[in-house]
Image (spheres, grey):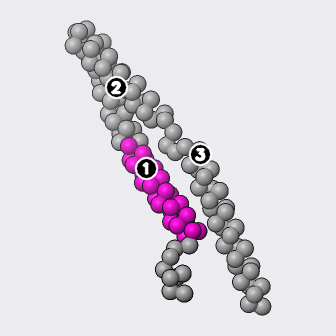
Amino acid sequence: MAEKMSQPMPEDTELDQALLELERSLEQLQARFLQVKQDRAEQRQLQQHLSQAEAALKQERSPALRSEVAQLKQKLEELEIALESQLLSWSWVREVFWQAVRFGGIGILIGWLLRAWAS
């Protein structure tokens, strides 16, 4: 009997694996969210710097300012592409939703069975 208690049930290991995967996904989501915040702050700084450089370019037409404006525009385009990528994928949301429905449904079913058994 002690041997049966020490061995994990297959459902337990499956649940543990699902929880570990959920934790990894959450960590990835948090890292991506932090990256988006940093990219947005950098985008604001680059836009301010670009507007200043364009104003200076209108006053003084130097090749150095032209190349600086071109570089700033290129960096802004790269940041916009990075920001346009999705913060989270819909497949991840769908998977988490169905896991919640499945485990919530199992919990309700077990609750009803225990209540019926206790009555």
Name the kind of residue labelled 3 in the image: Ser
Q: Point out residue 17 in the picture as x, y percentages from the top left corner.
A: 50, 61
Q: Earlier in the sequence, mark 3 or mark 1?
A: 1
The three-letter code of the residue at mark 2 reads Lys
Q: Quick one: SS at disc 3?
A: helix
Residue 82 is drawn in which quadrant? top left
Q: Position of residue 55 (x, y in %)?
A: 30, 18
The mark that comes first in sequence, 3 or 2, is 2
- Is the stretch drawn in magenta largely helix, strand or loop? helix
User: In the image, is residue 7 part of the stretch drawn in magenta?
Assistant: no
What's the CA distance linking mark 3 and mark 1? Answer: 14 Å
The image quadrant of residue 83 is: top left
Which residue is at 70% across, 67% downward? 105
- Marks 3 and 2, how far apart at CA: 30 Å
Q: Residue at point 39% right, 31% down?
A: 79
In the rendered view of the protein, which quadrant contains the C terminus?
Answer: bottom right
